[in-house]
Image (tube, rainbow, N blue to C red):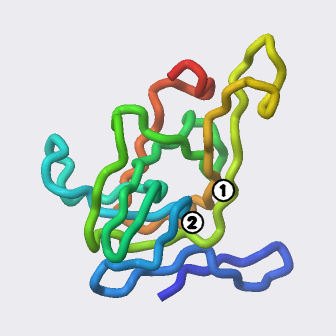
Amino acid sequence: RELAARTRRGRARTIATAAPDDGCAEAAEGDVVSFAMPEGYDGDAGARRLGVVKAEMSCTAWVQPLVEQGADQGEDEMMLVEDDTFDEPVQVQGAIDFVFDDVFYGQLPVPSLGGGVGYGAPAIECWTVARAAVPDGVDVPVSADGVAPWTH
């Protein structure tokens, strides 16, 4: 099962691929995925979230949940950053149901006096995905920190 979108020229392109029924998706480190939260996360068990795979081995993945950075990102795309309410990635087994194929990775530089990214200034990782690619029933919380990620 694939989710497709139309390009500006009217061609179909794959933007997300569904995992097999056993939930053992072929997700690799750095992939943005849709997953079900495991037991033990303050009533969130079974809730579907977006996350980025930090490590994977066989059918086990360590996924860092993501939040939308700011509420005014537009109607077509959303920019995601790591959810800082999680100190470490969530370990999931067979709970990944979608792997996003069309993701734009970037970094948001944190303002500093020492120069930009690559010159000693820190940056916050971000991922941009099409809103149409997010499967139904997936919760995408909006960051309470607004559009300035360095305020985290």
Label 1, label 2: how far apart the Cα atoms are: 7 Å
Query: Image quarter for residue 148?
Result: top right
Q: Quick one: label 2, few (<14), some, or many (20+) residues within 10 Å?
A: some
Indicate the position of residue 7 as horizontal and vertical percent values: 77, 75
Confirm or deny contact between disc 1 and disc 2 (CB under 8 A): yes
Task: Tell me the element at label 1.
Answer: loop
Location of residue 74 with respect to 32 vertically, above or below: above
Kind of residue sitting beneath label 2 = Ala
Q: What secondary structure is marked by label 2? A: helix
Q: Name the spot of residue 140 as percent of width and height, x first.
A: 43, 49
In front of the other: 111 or 72: 111
Left or right of 19: which side holds 112?
Answer: right
Q: Amino acid at mark 1?
A: Asp
Q: Would residue 102 appear left or right of 51 to someone viewing this image?
A: right
Q: Residue furthest top?
A: 113
Q: Which residue is mark 2?
A: 132
- In terms of image quadrants, where is residue 9? bottom right
Residue 108's tag is none
Q: Is residue 140 left or right of residue 73?
A: left
